[in-house]
Image (cartoon, rainbow, N blue to C red):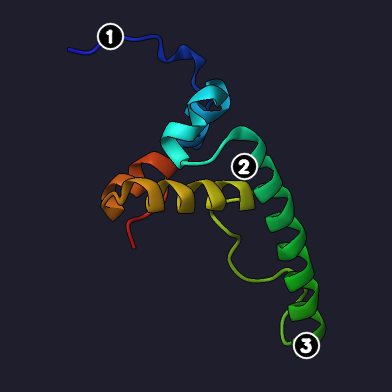
Amino acid sequence: MVEGNFNRLPKGKIHLTLNYILEYPHRKKQIQGITNHQSQDLLAQAEMQHEKLQTEIESKKIPINQKGGGPKPKLEIKEEICLYLFYLRKIPTFQVLGLHFGISKT
């Protein structure tokens, strides 16, 4: 049986890969294939581009429901980027991605 200190893990959603990278940033190159500095630059650019696209979509949308209606995204932008990089680097199955990022395999 595996023993460990699981008290340090956050309550609620547990994203194993993201939590591991945040705890050990020097291992990011091995897991994602990019350095910590490159990752921060990528996240900043992705968040800016996401906000730009969201405002563009909202401006073109014909309002049927209230603003902000519909299902909420399961992952934040930084979690999505981490998932994409992990997937491209390791090519895991969708079940493994679901376990690591707390999402469904579909």
Image position, residue 60 (x, y; %): 78, 87
Q: Which mark is residue 3?
A: 1
Q: Residue at x 73, y 72 (%)?
A: 53
Q: Is residue 15 visible?
A: no
**Quarter in which the N terminus is drawn:** top left
Give amino acid for label 1: Glu
Image position, residue 103 (x, y; %): 41, 50
| SS under mark 3 | helix
Image position, residue 84 (x, y; %): 47, 54
Task: Examine the rendered structure and indicate whether residue 1 appears above or below residue 57.
Answer: above
| Nearest the eye: 81 or 26 | 26
Task: Examine the rendered structure and indicate whether residue 16 appears above or below residue 86.
Answer: above
Q: Earlier in the sequence, mark 3 or mark 1?
A: 1
In the image: residue 79, left or right of residue 3: right
Q: Which residue is mark 3?
A: 60
Q: Residue at x 54, y 23 (%)?
A: 26
C-alpha gap between disc 3 and disc 2: 31 Å
Q: Earlier in the sequence, mark 3 or mark 2?
A: 2
Q: Is residue 30 visible?
A: yes
Q: In the current view of this chain or complex, which residue is farthest to the bottom?
A: 62
| SS under mark 1 | loop
Q: Which residue is mark 2?
A: 39
Instruction: Name the image quarter holding residue 65.
Output: bottom right
